[in-house]
Amino acid sequence: MRKVLFVGFFVLMLVLVFAPRIGASPDNIHVPYDYLTIQAAINAAGVGDTIIVHSGIYNEHIVIDKELVLTGEDQTAIIDGDGTDTVVNITSSGVLVRGFTIRNAGSNWTQRDSGIYLKNRQFCHLESNYIENCRLGIYLLGSSHIEIVGNVLANNVEGIRLDNSPENTVAFNSIVENGYNLVLSNSDLNGVKGNYIANATYSGIHIQAFSTNNTIYGNMIKNCSTGVVLSQSDDNIFYHNSFIENADQAWFGASFDNVWNIDWPDGGNYWSDHSNVDVKSGQYQMGTGSDGICDSAYSVDVGNMDMYPCAGPVSYFGVEFIVPEDIVVISNSSISEFQMNTTAKTITFLATGDPGVGFSRVDIPSSVASGLWLGNYRVLVNGVPISFGNWTAGSMTYIYFGYEHSTEEIVIVPEFPLMVLLPLFILTSLLATTYHRRNRRL
């Protein structure tokens, strides 16, 4: 009898020890409902769990020491460091942090006080966070394969800083009104794409200390003291960036072999202080007609030339067509409400500008142009078909057209080729004839 009781007691203890946590599923933990603090939820979480932090102010300094998802409620979940230390310290690889307002880290440079801090980590994802009033907004040290996407970083001494951190992605962030908006230091092979980088006290992008082979493309760099600083850094490539009204567009210190364009027809960068005359076309700009590329080169600095400056600011739009792709629009219009509809087989956007002549050049992966339109398409401006120029080079299709400003709705739609129209016409005629004969019989 005692043996039976002992076995029963042992089984009961096993059930109690390994039973699911009360108040939370094994996969989802809610703060403050399951745990009052974010750190308590992290401590209790298992690998792969998702912690959902609801609206409120959490005065914490948290350490994420395991692979998990930490998601805030529409940036109304606020993690406030009260002006001391690092607010979010990620000490595990494979972490996703998204949807928070993170603010008020310390100001200590020696200990690298940060909104989000990663040291020697890989494969983390930081998305859609608002980070302000920190010494360093996001800081990577010795980390790789980190994706920093869709965040807003404002009013920090440095918005994003990468130290000794290769092969990371910084994309589609708004990095504004920091002392230094983005710093790459001794960091190679990073991709910096589609960011809005504006109003930096010192520099929009600062590349220093032997940072090489970084690709900087599709960014708008605007109203900064210096747009790009290159210091002791070689072999970086810049293209499709828009340098607009920076006090100094670029500054160089002991930096060589940096490249400021790719070949025609893709082009280089837009420079607001260039003449931006575009009445010729082609690789040597000797053909007739415009192509979205300026007729003359732009001197970035002594020994640094943009051979194919763009005739208007450049916008990047990410789309999904079998695989993620980028569609690029070079235009002297403000481009908004960009959409690709794979069901209707259309690309649409609004082009807005002051009264006068506007233009847009739409660069589309040929796989998308073929998949949507079988290579046959037309351009409508406010519903009216217009003439356009188009050409294909490499894996891209380029469509160039002009219009009169104020606000124009641009639609690119399929154009039915004759081989399709003729059968449709014959079928329609047969149906009409059959219908007419049937009515006569009646």
Image: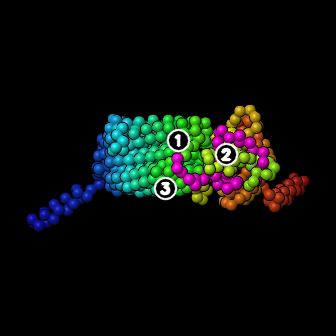
Instruction: Determine which of the numbered discs, if any, sits on residue 298 in the image.
Output: 2
Q: Which of 313 and 79 is in front in this view?
A: 313
Can residue 349 be seen from the camera position used here?
no
Q: Residue at x 55, y 43 (%)?
A: 251
Q: Residue at x 53, y 44 (%)?
A: 229
Q: Is residue 207 left or right of residue 71?
A: right
> Is residue 265 in the magenta section?
yes
First in sequence: mark 2 vs mark 1? 1
Q: Nearer the viewer, residue 104 or 434?
A: 104
Extreme residue in the right direction: 440
Can residue 254 be seen from the camera position used here?
yes
Considering only vertical position in the picture, is 128 above or below 94? above
The residue at which mark 1 appears reads as 204
Looking at the picture, how far across and down is residue 59, in whole percent? 32, 37
Q: Are marks 2 and 1 in contact (CB under 8 Å)?
A: no
Q: Which amino acid does label 1 sit on?
A: Gly
Looking at the picture, how far across and down is residue 163, in whole percent? 42, 51
First in sequence: mark 1 vs mark 3? 3
Looking at the picture, how far across and down is residue 401, in whole percent? 75, 46
Q: What residue type is labelled 2?
A: Tyr
The residue at which mark 3 appears reads as 188
Q: Do the residues labelled 1 and 3 touch (CB within 8 Å)?
A: no
Extreme residue in the left direction: 2
**Marks 2 and 1, how far apart in space?**
20 Å
Q: Please provide the residue range marked out in magenta.
A: 253-282
Q: Which residue is drawn at 44% across and 56% down?
A: 144
Q: Which of 363 and 9 is in front in this view?
A: 363
